Amino acid sequence: MKCTNREGVRGQEKRSFIYRFVSTVCICMLVLGSLCGCGNLKYDMAYDTDSQLTGFNVVTTNYPGRLEAFAADLCVVTDNVMDDENVDMSQAVAAVLFDVNQKEVIYSKNAHERLHPASLTKVMTALVALQNAPLDKVLTATSAVTITESGAQLCGLKSGDTMTLDQALHILLMYSANDVAMLIAENIGGTTEHFMEMMNEEAKRLGATNTNFCNPHGLTQDGHYTTAYDLYLIFNEAIKYEKINEIIHMTSYQTTFYKGDGEARELSINTTNRFLKGDFQAPENVTVIGGKTGTTNAAGHCLMLLSRDTSGAPYISVILCSEANDILYPEMIDLLDEINK
């Protein structure tokens, strides 16, 4: 007599039915997704930090999933986008203008060419400092603040002098003091070398793969370079901080810090931005909020700005290695006038 395990057969039939049911549901969901085009699958898109380009092309397919690219929320530049009739950028090596909200490339010349950034470096110095310390942190100067390079902008710090990070950031971004950049680097990073590692790590995180910082101030040094596009990435992150927006919009600043012996020292500074000083006027319907200036023999004359149109929409513009200061600002006016077109 042949015995049959009826419970085992029923179990197999039940599992087979469940399998067919689940498979049918999954197929239906895929079909509906393809018909609706509303897939929301996400994929990581890795990028090579040694790449010569920091803009990435995304190829669109008919697949219903959604590819989350690294630069999904950024302007991406692959080619020059120039208006030679209205923008004379012949005396500058590189320049860019981006509509931040619309992620639109309005103008681009040599956006990915590696160049000396001069004091535009200090925007990254300020960004990393704000990310790693409170504004009321007291910074103490060491001999590292002694800078002897001819023509270097200084506020006269000596070893033992103290000020808060908040004071230091104002002096750094408005007056572009190189000794204050060293003060910030040593106190936030522990050592200047470690702070440079922090700056370069942040650059990589932001996708600024054509950037390498060797110092926190931007004075000329071999191996210290960035690009107009990478500076856009850095500045785009920096303006997310209310303190940076506040400082770059100021025209003057007065404060008191302390010498090593405890004696108070008053300091009064003015912005280096000639738009804010009133030397030059932005085009009609464009307001310059502020930014950062930079000048060295190697970098030429550099300027990076945050501006807004009549609706308050933000724009970032960068010009690197212009021939002269009196050429740089008219070039920037031409560039900003593209916002009105």
Image (tube, rainbow, N blue to C red):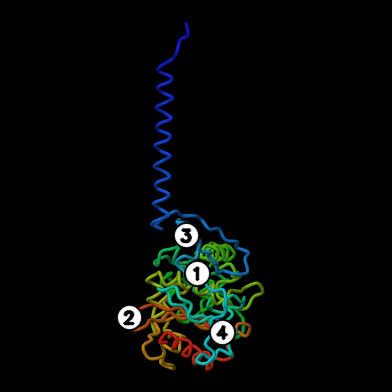
Earlier in the chain: of badge 2 and badge 1, it is 1
The mark closer to the camera, 1 or 3, is 3
Mark number, residue 311 = 2
Furthest toward the front, the residue is 1
Q: Amino acid at mark 2?
A: Ser
Residue 111, position as x, y percentages in the image: 57, 77
Looking at the image, which residue is at 55% across and 89% down?
89
Q: Is residue 253 visible?
A: no
Residue 3, position as x, y percentages in the image: 46, 10
Residue 109, position as x, y percentages in the image: 56, 82
Q: Looking at the image, which is closer to me, 56 or 269?
A: 56
Furthest toward the right, the residue is 222
Earlier in the chain: of badge 1 and badge 4, it is 1
- Which residue is identified by label 1? 184
Q: Amino acid at mark 3?
A: Glu
Q: Looking at the image, which is closer to me, 329 or 22?
A: 22
- Cα separation, mark 2 vs mark 3, equals 29 Å
Furthest toward the top, the residue is 1
Looking at the image, which residue is at 60% across and 82% down?
299
The mark closer to the camera, 4 or 2, is 2
Mark number, residue 91 = none
- Cα separation, mark 4 vs mark 2, equals 32 Å
Label 2: which secondary element? loop
- Which residue is identified by label 3? 68
Q: Looking at the image, which is closer to me, 63 or 211?
A: 63
- Which residue is identified by label 4? 295
